Amino acid sequence: MTQYCFLNGKILPIEEAKISPIDIGLLRGYGIYDGLAAFGGKPFRFMDHWNRFVSGAHILNLNIPITEEKAEKVIVELLEKNGHMERANIRMILTGGETLGGIEYDFENPTFYILTEKWDSLPEDYYKNGAKLITYNHKRELPEYKTTNYIRATVLQNFRKEEKAVEILYVYDGEVLECATSNIFLVKNNTLITPSENILKGITRKVVLELADGKYKIEERSVGEEELKTADEIFITSSFKDIIPVVKVDDFEIAGGEVGGVTKDLMAKFKAYIAVPE
Amino acid sequence: MTQYCFLNGKILPIEEAKISPIDIGLLRGYGIYDGLAAFGGKPFRFMDHWNRFVSGAHILNLNIPITEEKAEKVIVELLEKNGHMERANIRMILTGGETLGGIEYDFENPTFYILTEKWDSLPEDYYKNGAKLITYNHKRELPEYKTTNYIRATVLQNFRKEEKAVEILYVYDGEVLECATSNIFLVKNNTLITPSENILKGITRKVVLELADGKYKIEERSVGEEELKTADEIFITSSFKDIIPVVKVDDFEIAGGEVGGVTKDLMAKFKAYIAVPE
C-alpha cells in the first residue's frame, strides 16, 4: 500500500517527497518537530500539540506555512489514505528551508511536512510489570522547545538497549529533568511530583495532570535525584508510549519492584480517556 | 551551469539529489558535517578535515561509506564539474540515513553527501580595518565534534547582523570558548593565546599555530572573559573566513580599535601559505 505524506502544500507518495540536501534542517539541524498520537483516524489533543509547535516556530523564527485548520484536515486525510485508522503516530516537521549563505534561510520559504506511521506498541510486559530507566547527566539545549536536536537521545539508544531500559532519564546538577522522549512522575504519599522547568512539557504529561486533578495532590516543582530512591512509585509519559510504570532506575529497585496503585489508577483513567477523546 | 553534488555513491545534478523526509539527519538532527576551503580545484588540508570527520562519525557511531582517497577524488571532480576552480567551499555531510523506530537507524545505510559552492568573500573592510564580535553565553553540546547541530548559531544570525558583528563569540561561566563558526586568538606581549577545551579545533586554527610556531610564544589554555579587555590584539580564524582581525567585542574597543602587527603578520603568512598549499 502506497504511503503518503504532506510536503510543502501537497499530499504525495512518500518516495516522491524529497528534501533538498541543502535544507538547513540537514546542514544546520535547524528545525522543530512534534509527535502526536492518532486514534480512529483523528489526532489526539491536536491543539495542544499545535500550540507547542507554534511556540517552537516562534523561538526559532520559523514560518509555519499552513493554518491549524488545514494541518488538522491534512492529518485526517493522510491517516485515511495511509490506512492508519487504528492507533498511529503523526510527525510534523518544520525547517528553515534551503540554506542561504551557509547558515541563514529565507523566512518565506520553509520546509514543512507531515508523516503518519503505524503505531508499534512497546512490549506488554512494560505496562504490566514495569520497566527500567537509566540515568544520564544531561540537560537539553532549549529544553522547553521540541527542536529536531535529538543527537544525545539518538546516540544513547544502544546504551539504553544494552541496559534493557525503556528510556534514558536526564538528570543534571543533581536534579531530575525528563527522559529522552518522555516525562517523568514520582508518586509519594499519594502526591504526584513532576519536574516543571528545563523540560519539554509533554501533552500526555498534561493529560495525566488533568486526570489526576482533584484526586491526587500535584506538585510541579524541581525534583532532586535523591527523591527517586524514596518514591512510592515512578512512571513516565509520552505520546507514543502513554503511561509506563517504572520499577527500576539504574540498579535501584523502586518500591520493591512492584507497579504501584496510583500508577495503575492513572493508566486505567488514561486508557478510558483516549478511548473517548473529546 | 548545472551544479552537481555527490550523494550516496553518485555524482548527480543537485536538483536530482534529494534526501528522504524520514532521514534521521532531519527528524532527529543526527549527523556530522565538515566545511573545507578549496583553492585551484583542490581541497585545502584535506586530511586534517577528514580526520576530524572520522572522529565525529566515531562519536555518533556513524558509518562513513567512502574511503578518504575516493572522497578526495570526488571533491576534485565536483570542483571541476561545477566550475569552482577559483576559491570554493566544500561541505561534507553524514547522517544515519532513514530513521527506524522513530529514533534509530541502520548503521549500514547512512546518508553521505558532498556539496561545493562558490566562495563568497566577506567585506574587504573586515580584513583591512577589523571587525566586531558579540558575546553570547553558551557552550555547544559535544563541542569537540562538528555535528550538524547549529541551532544556536543559526538563531543568532539576525542578532549578529543587527549588531553589525562578523561573529558570535560563545563565552561560558566566565570563559572564552569559540565563535559560532570560528576560533578565537588573543595576542598579549607577542604571545598567541587560544582556548583549547570545549571547542571545535578548526583547521585554520591549526595552520595558524603552525605558522606562528617558533616566531611567537603560544599558549593553548583556558581563557578568562576578562582577558579580552587586556588583549593587545584579537583575531578569529575559520576555513571560510581565513584570519579576520577583531577590533571590537560587544561595545569594548580592543587595543584602540587598530589592527595589530602580529595579526597582520599572520594574515600575510596565511595568505602566502594558501597560495602555495603543500
Image (spheres, coloured by chain):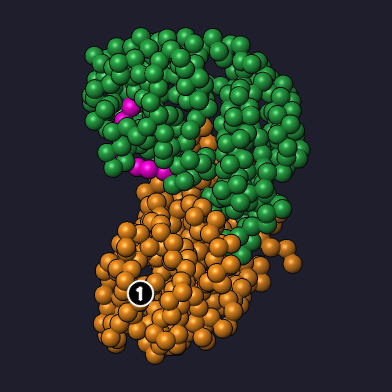
Chain colours: A green, B orange
Which residue is found at the position 63% from the left and 29% from the top? A47
Judge by depth and name the residue closer to the eye, B111 or A252.
Answer: A252
Judge by depth and name the residue closer to the eye, A266 or B24.
Answer: A266
Q: Is residue B134 left or right of residue B119?
A: left
Q: Is residue A73 above or below residue A156?
A: above
Q: Label 1 belongs to which residue?
A: B228
Quarter of the image where one finds residue B113: bottom right
Relative image position of residue B214 (x, y in whole percent): 27, 85
Magenta region: A133-140
Relative image position of residue B263 (x, y in whole percent): 40, 85
User: From the image, which quarter does the C terminus of chain A lie in?
Assistant: top right
Which residue is found at the position 64% from the left and 57% from the top? A105
Q: Is residue A90 above or below residue B174?
A: above
Judge by depth and name the residue closer to the eye, A275 or A126.
Answer: A275
The chain letter for the residue carrying disc 1 is B
Label the magenta part by its dominant secondary structure.
strand
Q: Is residue B63 magenta?
A: no
Q: Is residue A100 above or below residue A141?
A: below
Which residue is found at the position 24% from the left and 22% from the top? A230
Q: Is residue B5 above or below residue B275?
A: above
Q: Is residue A139 magenta?
A: yes
User: From the image, which quarter does the N terminus of chain A lie in?
Assistant: top right
